[in-house]
Image (tube, rainbow, N blue to C red):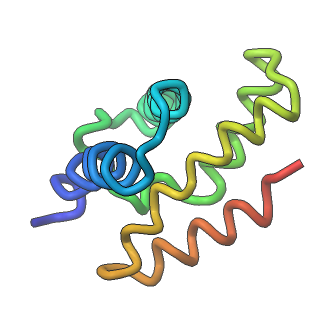
Amino acid sequence: MNGASRFPALLEAFFVDRLIRQRQASAHTITSYRDTFRLLLQYAQQRLSKAPSQMTLSDLDTPLLGAFLDHLEQKRDNSARTRNVRLAAHPFVLPLRRSSCSGVQWAGSARARHAK
């Protein structure tokens, strides 16, 4: 499975396996994560000129994430608190521990650089 075809499957697994089955997350939590990923993927699609189904995890790198968080504050008038809620979506990469150390490093570096 290549990176582009794997990313949508990883995102789906995050919602189904991680949030619903393992964490038994509330409907509000799932909705918040869904909204965050919707915003992120729409932003990335505009910025990268690439459909979300063709994106790879490496497309969502730290510079893109930082620009996305800045976009939330500047263009969508989100507060720093709301911005940090959106940043909380990064546990998405934790299930990648089994298959990619770079994904875990990406999550840690993104959080460290962008939390306010």
Q: Position of residue 112 (x, y in %)?
A: 78, 66
Q: Between 97 and 77, which is closer to the camera in this rendering?
A: 97
Q: What is the quadrant of the N terminus in the image? A: bottom left
Quarter assignment of residue 105: bottom right
Q: Residue furthest left?
A: 1
Please say if 47 is above or below 74. Answer: below
**Residue at (30%, 80%) from the top-left corner?**
99
Q: Position of residue 36 (x, y in %)?
A: 54, 31
Please say if 41 is above or below 97. Answer: above
Quarter assignment of residue 62: bottom right
Please say if 112 is above or below 92. Answer: below
Q: Between 66 and 107, which is closer to the camera in this rendering?
A: 107
Q: Between 54 and 48, which is closer to the camera in this rendering?
A: 54
Please say if 106 is above or below 75. Answer: below
**Residue at (44%, 39%) from the top-left corner?**
48
Q: Between 45 and 100, which is closer to the camera in this rendering?
A: 100
